[in-house]
Amino acid sequence: MAGVLGTSIKRREDPALITGRGKYTDDLKVEGMTHAAIVRSPYAHARIRGIDTSAAESYPGVVAVLTARDVAAAGIPGVVPVGWLLPDLKTPAHPMIAADTVRHVGDAVAVVVAEDRYIARDAAERVAVDYEPLDAVADVVAALEDGAPTVHDDAPGNVAFDWEIGEKDPVDAAFAQAANTVELDLRNNRLIPHAIEPRAVLASYDSSTGEMTIHMTSQNPHVHRLLMTLASLGMPEHKVRIVAFGSKIHHYADEAIVGLCSLKLDRPVKWTATRTETNLTDAHGRDHSTHCAMAFDGEGRITGLRVDTKAAMGAYLSTFAPAVPTYLYGTLMSGQYDIPAIHCHVTGVFTHTAPVDARGHLRCRAADAPRRRGDRPRPDRSPQAELRARRRLSVPDPGRARVRLGELRAGDGPRTRDDRLRRPLP
């Protein structure tokens, strides 16, 4: 690896991709290919009283129109599973296509397959859905209040999970004995991803072999194949081949819907999200409300850290949603600070919004939180403030920091701290 590690390597794939000479999923064409358009709910919460697909089915160029009834008739599992479990996690079913109730704007209620994408989209507008709008809740804090609209009947109080890590009693003792304490409320806003190419899927089923090839925008084809075959399409895993590169790791209903269309029609089917669909259905990120508190001794050393986070899950549990605000967040609370007692409590909350999953995880926010709290008692640049900052770090060894909830490896803690002290306060 001489000449590679530690050196800047010029990327060779970029020029073609950014000058129109690359090949994205939507550029792929195969013989007999059809195009899909997904009909989506305009309501955050509504009961489906009926769907009339006759006008779409009779539209010239339409091959098929599928609803939840067709998913059931296909005899497949027909759901989108969660890929990470926690103790006592509530896992309400996430249907590929909603049958009775929609739970967020963009929830799929039907799919139209046609000879070209424009016909498919025109026909999709002719699918008539009779909705009964219901009360909805979009705010993670409001969803936990008494009387809030219920997202799932099998998740009372809209609680998906109640998780904690650390040592509550030592933290309580640290606060009881503290010379100074500081509290802070943080709101980590919801994020929406936007890739150069929106999510896209091309599924090709071959009835003669019982095999399916799926091109899609994903960074982890193995996870997608496992979840899609196991819980969505019910096919043997070795019969599905996935070719992928793209936006994160999540398994979406749309990919399974397109696979089902190809399976039923025995023809290749392509779907490419519009930018509007990207905003409505790509897994969002974060959406946390956090109250945190820090205790200090008389010398300015941190003696305790208490964090309580309400983390939005959206309407359904996305692939790794339960892991993001727990093991990928709570375990990192100390950062490089020497904090002898930490307790982190996280409540996962269902809301009538798009599902939330990994978008940069919460690592940056978890690492930033102790610094934000630590600066609050006396935000100044005095020698005393610098001394306090140096005492809080736990990094005598530049390559390793032992922290309360784990171990940080690599990096140069003292240099990072000194650089932090030279920068202006936010």
Image (cartoon, rainbow, N blue to C red):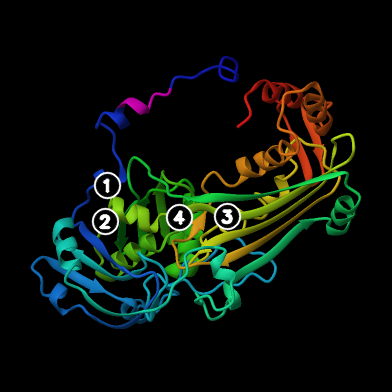
Residue tagged 1: 26
Q: Secondary structure at mark 1?
A: helix
The answer to which quarter of the image holds residue 62 is bottom left
Verify CB contact (< 8 Å) between mark 2 and mark 1.
yes
Dot 1 or dot 4: first in sequence order is 1
Disc number placed over residue 288 in the picture, else none? 3
Dot 4 or dot 3: first in sequence order is 4
The label nearer to you, 1 versus 3, is 3
Dot 3 or dot 2: first in sequence order is 2
Q: Quadrant of the N terminus?
A: top right
| Amino acid type indicated by mark 2 | Lys
The label nearer to you, 2 versus 4, is 4
Q: Secondary structure at mark 2?
A: strand
Left or right: residue 40 versus residue 312 is left
The answer to which quarter of the image holds residue 97 is bottom left
The Cα–Cα distance between marks 3 and 2, rounded to whole angstroms, is 35 Å
Dot 2 or dot 4: first in sequence order is 2
Disc number placed over residue 270 in the picture, else none? 2
Q: Give the magenta-colored segment's residue range.
A: 11-15
Mark 3, other Cα within 10 Å: few <14 / some 14–19 / many ≥20: many
Location of residue 150 with respect to 118 vertically, above or below: below
Residue 183 location (% of width, % of height): 72, 49
Location of residue 381 with respect to 101 vertically, above or below: above
The Cα–Cα distance between marks 4 and 3, rounded to whole angstroms, is 15 Å
The label nearer to you, 4 versus 3, is 3
